Image: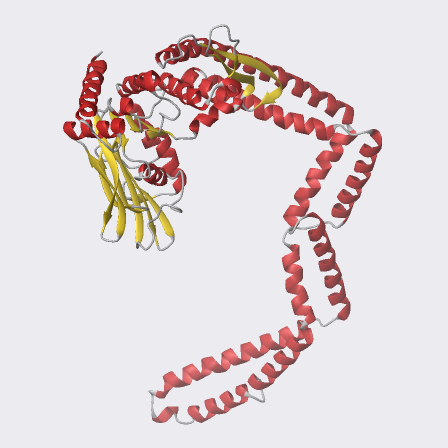
């Protein structure tokens, strides 16, 4: 259940804090007072839209925060599955815009907006002003039916999806496998050429790195040799080694005079030995340096070959070898083409039969659910003043399988006696669509795992007796779920368990939207305003009070 909405710096709303209650929460107010802004703020908090168009100009930041209390263990488990930390069964969703950057948090932890959307799907269902339009798209009819069928459909759908993925894979492979003899011969020739080119190269893993190191050494051999010769001269018999030898002679001549010089003498002796060892190694290294142009050419040629193969088949030797193995498998397939094709066709046909079986199970479950769904929707439509209504679901089998089976479902309706059943999208007016969607929502309410349903101007296109029946249906839904409804109709507002008024005020030179909770007397006054407009007479007040009393009696039954 949504227990609190906190909004700061959203369009005309400088700050609003709304504590919602159980049952039917009504929000009413003059046209343009800011009801759509509040619903926009809720949508922003849930990650369903961005701050653009809502953030208050000139403000340092904008904030929208929703506080939910989890209604049952199933909802708690769904939130736990999203790895969202929960304390005292509360989920606090916060989205904040500051310096052009939006940050989303759940219970104080920063999360990506995708997680916010997943949490929103568990906690709340928003029926916006334009959601009735989903009834104009047949694919949505199947989604609604599947939602109604619920858990009974899940295991069959999972098995169908597994089969469908395998079916799609085999179908694509079969389409690619069917080549004519000429094309097959050409492909075999090309594959043989590629395989031979790679195998003739006799690649060894890691040889490219070794060759590059060797090439660097050979290409700079003369420079290296000159440097090594100079080092040998500087540290050899005519350089440091000679100087160290003379230093040893000088020091040995005075050792008998001071025994403490023995340590220094030994250190200098070590240096002399190290220099001699170093010079021998330098000399040996110089002798081994190969500046042979032919060797350089051979290494360079091998590297060129490797680089050409890398350009054609993969940027590493491992990838080239892997590519070669793949082509060998393909060549083997083409060499045994008839056997391969026969095996592939057999596997494809077997998978197709399995898919057909699973699709048939889906269809049977959907048809069973459709009978119950149609009966319940028809009953709900009668309660919404469709007195002679007929409602059914028409099934059509698609020409090929889809990710959701082979069924196409269409809602069929007749709203007048003698009128044939026709697709909802072809026959229903705007006001009728609104009521049909409400009927469906009322039927789905027991299937919904969410605790809160929002109806944004569900009263569009209705009035009179129909509006009264819509209000009664909302009250029924509110008996099992928290309902938040924005309305312009007194019949619906009268049913409120909790009534809020949204009004526009001018403070100084600034226009602001304020939201406040109404007590019983204020609620009657708001009903009178809706009924009577600018001038509220005693007769209008009496009518408002009577509507409130009738609504209270209706909710008791």
The percent coordinates of residue 121 (x first, y second) are 37, 30
The location of residue 556, given as percent across then percent down, is 20, 13
* x 32%, y 32%: residue: 80
Relative to residue 167, is residue 545 drawn left or right?
left
To which quarter of the image does residue 90 belong? top left
Q: Position of residue 430 (x, y in %)?
A: 45, 24
Relative to the observer, which residue lies in front, 169 or 89? 89
Residue at image location 27% in from the left, 24% down from the top: 490
Left or right position of 198 against 99:
right
In this figure, what is the number of numbered marks? 0
In the foreground, 76 or 52: 52
274, above or below 135, in the image: below
* Residue farthest right in this picture: 182
Q: Classify 351 as above or below 76.
A: above
In this rendered view, identify the residue nearer to me: 516 or 361: 516
Tell me how the rendering is colored: secondary structure
Q: Residue furthest top?
A: 418
Residue 292: tell me if it is visible: yes
User: Please, is residue 377 above or below residue 525 in the view?
Assistant: above
Quarter placement of the N terminus? top left
Residue 25, quarter of picture = top left
Above or below: residue 117 compared with residue 309? above
Judge from the rendering whether residue 199 lies leftward or rightward of residue 269; answer left or right: right
The residue nearer to you, when weighing 354 against 285, is 354
Residue 369 x %, y %: 45, 11
- Quarter of the image with the C terminus is top left
Residue at image position (38%, 34%) is 118
With 532 as the anchor, is 173 left or right in this view? right
Can residue 1 be seen from the camera position used here? no
């Amino acid at each position: 259940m949504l227990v609190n909405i906190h909004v700061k710096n959203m369009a005309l709303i400088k700050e609003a804090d709304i504590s919602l209650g159980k049952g039917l929460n009504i929000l009413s107010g003059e046209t343009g007072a800011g009801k759509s802004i509040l619903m926009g703020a809720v949508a922003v908090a849930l990650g369903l839209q961005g701050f653009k168009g809502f953030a208050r100009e000139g403000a340092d930041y904008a904030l929208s925060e929703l506080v939910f209390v989890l209604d049952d263990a199933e909802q708690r488990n769904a939130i736990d599955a999203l790895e969202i930390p929960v304390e005292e069964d509360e989920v606090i969703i916060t989205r904040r815009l500051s310096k052009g950057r939006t940050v989303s948090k759940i219970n104080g932890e920063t999360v990506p907006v995708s997680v916010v959307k997943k949490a929103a799907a568990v906690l709340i269902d928003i029926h916006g002003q334009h959601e009735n339009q989903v009834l104009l798209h047949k694919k949505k009819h199947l989604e609604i039916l599947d939602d109604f069928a619920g858990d009974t459909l899940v295991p069959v759908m999972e098995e169908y999806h597994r089969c469908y993925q395998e079916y799609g894979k085999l179908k694509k492979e079969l389409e690619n496998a069917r080549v004519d003899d000429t094309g097959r011969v050409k492909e075999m020739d090309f594959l043989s050429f590629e395989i031979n080119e790679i195998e003739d190269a006799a690649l060894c893993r890691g040889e490219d790195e070794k060759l590059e190191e060797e090439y660097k050494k050979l290409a700079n051999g003369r420079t290296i040799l000159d440097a090594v010769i100079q080092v040998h001269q500087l540290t050899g018999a005519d350089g440091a080694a000679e100087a160290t030898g003379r230093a040893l002679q000088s020091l040995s001549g005075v050792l008998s005079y001071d025994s403490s010089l023995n340590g220094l003498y030994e250190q200098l002796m070590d240096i002399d030995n190290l220099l001699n060892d170093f010079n021998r190694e330098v000399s040996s290294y110089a002798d081994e340096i190969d500046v042979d142009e032919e060797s350089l050419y051979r290494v360079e040629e091998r590297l060129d070959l490797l680089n050409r193969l890398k350009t054609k088949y993969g940027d590493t030797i491992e990838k080239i070898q892997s590519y070669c193995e793949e082509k060998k498998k393909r060549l083997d397939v083409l060499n045994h083409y008839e056997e391969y094709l026969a095996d592939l066709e057999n596997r494809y046909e077997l998978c197709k039969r399995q898919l057909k079986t699973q699709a048939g199970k889906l269809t049977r479950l959907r048809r069973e659910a459709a009978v119950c769904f149609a009966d319940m929707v028809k009953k709900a439509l009668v309660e919404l003043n469709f007195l002679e209504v007929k409602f059914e679901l028409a099934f059509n089998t698609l020409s090929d399988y889809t990710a959701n089976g082979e069924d196409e479902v269409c809602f069929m309706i007749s709203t007048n006696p003698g009128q044939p059943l026709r697709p909802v999208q072809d026959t229903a007016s705007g006001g009728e669509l609104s009521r049909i969607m409400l009927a469906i929502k009322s039927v789905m309410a027991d299937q919904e795992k969410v605790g809160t349903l929002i109806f944004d101007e569900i009263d569009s296109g209705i009035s009179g007796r129909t509006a009264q029946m819509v209000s009664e249906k909302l009250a029924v839904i509110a008996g099992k779920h928290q309902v938040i409804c924005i309305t312009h109709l007194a019949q619906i507002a009268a049913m409120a368990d909790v009534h809020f008024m949204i009004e526009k005020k001018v403070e100084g030179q600034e226009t602001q939207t304020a939201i406040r909770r109404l007590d019983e007397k204020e609620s009657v006054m708001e009903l009178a305003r809706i009924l009577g407009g600018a001038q509220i007479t005693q007769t209008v007040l009496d009518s408002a009070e009577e509507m409130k009393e009738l609504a209270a009696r209706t909710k008791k039954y």
